[in-house]
Each structure stands twice: as structure tokens, then as C-alpha cells.
């Protein structure tokens, strides 16, 4: 009997030791957002593969109704239906864990999840669940933008490379702020690898735009500038700053949007009252970014040096709809006139060069609308139930500073 008990203890210990301590998985960089395969545990002991969004700038767990049903999650007793970005949202139990690259990722410290009645957790995305900062803070994280790989590991197991700097980790939710300098002035900017584009609080953005009238700028979000296609993005301002210091590195030619007004107070509550904005994926594409949450340290390993000359796309500001369509909400000016004169707000984008727009992710849409400046994209638009064709020219928005062409 004693021998059998010892064998049981040894077998349990062996299983524990064999459990993966580190997982590296391929990444789909869609609209500069990190999308990976995750596996949901099912009640029958099986697993179901879905797409997951890795987001250090979001403290809440989000999943769609399909993912909740697959894991047999239930609404919380006080759950009430609300509406966000047009979608119906309810509060459900959070999952206990998911699996990434064979490694179990625990949600043990998360009590609830926001469940969306839609095909994905956000319009224009393929993700059915996210990995927020409240979950990621319990692991080591490495995102290699150059090789398109993500590594998650138990603390102390990841191999960090590059230059390091101390960061501030918000203890309640795991969101990270990194010291920065813009024009020699110190700021705190959140490290938000879930955001497609970097953003500044309105007061700082306005000051920099006023003090530096020659810095490239544009009005109306295009390409990766687009956040969610909210109406205010049709008039949203963007600015390209020649260079900033971020932790231990200098980031050249960083494009910034103004953080949407509706999110400013909410973001300060989550990231920290002293935050001046965030650094998103557009500024990190040459780096292998490491986050050692346990030791509040970030690492930046420069793996490339390419600087995009601008945002080269057809000039439309689009809103991804819940049904997979894309609606024009604005037409930015280019050299003093509308970039696509034939289009107007309310039009539906139906086809891009014979490829249907409906059902595409935001990354796919902007890839189809991109190209070299001067190229033509043939668009089919719909207005008042009638379709018509437009030859739209690819333009260069938010170009690099004159000295860096």
C-alpha cells in the first residue's frame, strides 16, 4: 500500500514536470494586432481551436457567444444586456483556462468576461476571445514582430534579449507604462501591443501639433490609424513625430492619433492617471518586445530598420459593421480635395479589385486598399441600394519627415 502511494506521488510529480513551461506560436499580424490560435477546453475533455487577440492594453476578458457556449459558461446572476459598438454585450463567467501552444494559460484571477453576441469580439476582427493584461501579467511575454512569433512562459522561463528598462505595472490589472521622452520632455506611455496605432491624449497632441506645424499630419483615419470606425474617426487628427525615446530605445518616425474622446477618461482609469497615451503596434514592427511582468522590466531587441515612407492606401475612413460589411464614414482630403471624390459618407464598400469586402478583417481590407502611390484600385460602392464603380487612387498619407525620405 505504501509503495503504491509513493508511485502515485511520483507519477503526479512527473506529469507536473512535463507540463509545458513555455510556448512559442506563430502570429497573424492583422491590422497590426496580434492574432494567434488558442484552444478552448470543452466540457467533454476535448478542445476547440479559435482565434485569440493578445492585448496588453486591455484589462477585460472578452469572448463571443459561441466561445462561451463551447465552454459552457453561464451569465452572472446580475448580468444585464448593454450595447458596445452596436453589439449586445452581457457579463458571463470567465473561463478557468485556455491552451496556447500546448501550454495551459490560467484565468484563475479573473472573475468575469464580457460576452458579445457577434461572430467575433470586435467588428473587423477574427478573434473570438482575447488574452488581456489581467491574464498576461502572470507570465513572461515576448512578441517578435519581425519573425511573427509570440512566446508565453511561466515567470523566469523566457529568454529576454535586447535593451531593458524598468516599467510601471498597474497591480490591479497588469497594464504597463514605460518612461518616454518627446522633444526632451518626460512622459509615461502605455505599452499597448493590442493597439494597431499609437495614440496621444488630446492636450499633448494639440500642444505638439501647435509647436511643430511642419510635422506631417492628416485628418480622417486611414489604414492602421483606424481604431474601430467610430464616427469621430472621420475627423480624427494624426501626427508623425520624427523620433521619441521609449524606455531604452529611440523610435523613429512614430505616427500618433489622438485617443478618441470617449476613451480618454476610461483609459486613464485603467492605465494610470499620469499616462499621456500609448505606443501601439505601428511603432514596434522592427522589434522583439519582451515583458518581464514579475520584475517590472521591458526589453526591446531591434531586429529590423525599415521605416514605411507613409500610409499608402486609398483615402477612405471605414467602419466595420457587425454583419461583416464596411461602411464609408468619411473621405479624407488629399492636397486640398477629397481623396476619393466620388465616395461619400454612408456608402457601403462592396468590392475591391474583384474581391468582396464583406467578411474581411480590417487587416485584409487595408491590404487590398494599399499599394504604391498612384496605383488604382477599382472599387464597387453601394448607395441607396444601387451599386457603382469608382477608380480610386492610392495616396500617401502621413509621410515621413522630409529629412528621412
Image: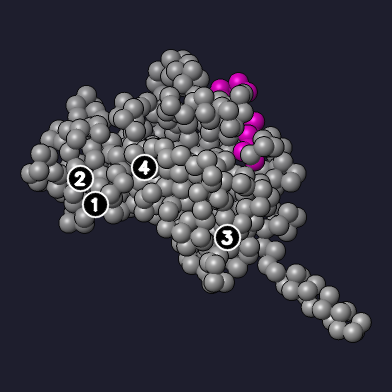
> What is the secondary structure assignment of the residue under circle 1?
loop
Residue 398 drawn at (x, y percent): 36, 33
Lower sequence index among marks 4 and 3: 4
Lower sequence index among marks 2 and 3: 3
Residue 87, labelled with which disc? 4
Residue 287 drawn at (x, y percent): 56, 48
Q: Is residue 88 left or right of residue 189?
A: left
Residue 357, labelled with which disc? 1
- Give the extent of the magenta segment: 174-188
Q: Residues within 10 Å of mark 3 (few under 14, many from 20)?
A: many
**Residue labelled with disc 2:** 349
Lower sequence index among marks 1 and 3: 3
Q: Is residue 155 above or below residue 2?
A: above
Real-space Cα separation, disc 1 to disc 2, in angstroms? 7 Å
| Circle 4/circle 1 CB separation < 8 Å | no
Residue sitting at 54 percent across and 44 percent down?
77
**Residue labelled with disc 3:** 98
Q: Is residue 364 above or below residue 179?
A: below
Q: Residues within 10 Å of mark 2 (few under 14, many from 20)?
A: many
Lower sequence index among marks 4 and 1: 4
Residue sitting at 30 percent across and 39 percent down?
319
Real-space Cα separation, disc 2 to disc 3, in angstroms? 36 Å
The answer to whether residue 171 shows anywhere in this view is yes
Residue 21 drawn at (x, y percent): 70, 64
Q: Nearer the viewer, residue 75 or 4?
A: 75
Real-space Cα separation, disc 4 to disc 1, in angstroms? 20 Å
Amino acid at each position: 500500500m505504501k509503495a503504491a502511494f509513493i508511485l502515485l506521488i511520483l507519477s503526479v510529480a512527473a506529469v507536473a514536470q512535463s507540463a509545458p513551461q513555455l510556448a512559442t506560436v506563430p502570429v497573424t499580424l492583422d491590422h497590426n494586432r496580434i492574432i494567434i490560435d488558442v484552444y478552448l477546453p470543452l466540457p467533454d475533455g476535448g478542445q476547440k481551436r479559435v482565434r485569440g487577440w493578445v492585448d496588453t492594453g486591455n484589462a477585460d476578458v472578452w469572448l463571443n457567444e459561441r466561445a462561451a457556449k463551447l465552454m459552457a459558461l453561464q451569465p452572472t446572476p446580475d448580468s444585464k444586456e448593454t450595447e458596445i459598438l452596436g453589439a449586445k454585450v452581457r457579463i458571463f463567467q470567465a473561463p478557468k483556462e485556455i491552451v496556447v501552444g500546448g501550454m495551459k494559460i490560467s484565468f484563475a484571477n479573473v472573475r468575469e468576461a464580457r460576452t458579445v453576441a457577434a461572430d467575433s469580439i470586435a467588428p473587423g476582427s477574427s478573434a473570438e476571445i482575447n488574452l488581456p493584461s489581467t491574464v498576461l501579467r502572470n507570465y513572461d511575454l515576448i512578441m517578435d514582430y519581425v519573425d511573427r512569433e509570440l512566446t508565453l512562459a511561466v515567470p523566469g522561463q523566457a529568454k529576454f534579449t535586447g535593451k531593458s528598462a524598468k516599467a510601471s505595472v498597474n497591480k490591479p490589472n497588469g497594464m504597463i507604462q514605460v518612461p518616454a521622452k518627446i522633444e526632451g520632455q518626460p512622459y509615461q506611455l502605455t505599452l499597448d501591443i493590442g493597439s494597431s496605432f499609437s495614440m496621444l491624449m488630446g492636450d499633448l497632441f494639440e500642444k505638439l501639433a501647435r509647436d511643430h506645424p511642419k510635422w506631417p499630419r492628416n485628418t480622417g483615419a486611414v489604414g492602421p490609424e483606424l481604431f474601430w470606425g467610430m464616427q469621430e474617426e472621420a475627423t480624427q487628427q494624426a501626427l508623425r513625430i520624427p523620433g521619441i525615446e521609449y524606455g531604452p530605445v529611440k523610435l523613429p518616425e512614430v505616427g500618433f492619433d489622438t485617443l478618441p474622446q470617449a476613451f480618454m477618461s476610461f483609459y486613464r482609469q485603467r492605465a494610470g492617471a499620469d499616462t499621456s497615451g500609448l505606443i501601439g503596434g505601428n511603432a514596434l514592427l522592427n522589434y522583439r518586445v519582451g515583458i518581464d511582468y514579475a520584475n517590472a522590466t521591458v526589453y526591446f531587441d531591434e531586429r529590423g530598420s525599415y521605416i514605411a515612407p507613409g500610409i499608402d492606401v486609398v483615402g477612405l475612413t471605414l467602419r466595420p459593421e457587425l454583419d461583416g460589411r464596411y461602411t464609408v464614414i468619411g473621405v479624407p482630403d488629399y492636397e486640398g480635395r477629397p481623396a476619393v471624390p466620388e465616395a461619400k459618407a454612408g456608402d457601403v464598400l462592396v468590392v475591391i479589385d474583384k474581391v468582396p469586402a464583406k467578411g474581411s478583417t480590417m487587416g485584409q481590407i487595408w491590404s487590398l486598399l494599399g499599394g504604391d502611390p498612384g496605383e488604382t484600385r477599382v472599387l464597387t460602392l453601394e448607395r441607396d441600394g444601387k451599386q457603382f464603380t469608382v477608380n480610386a487612387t492610392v495616396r500617401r498619407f502621413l509621410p515621413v519627415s522630409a529629412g528621412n525620405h
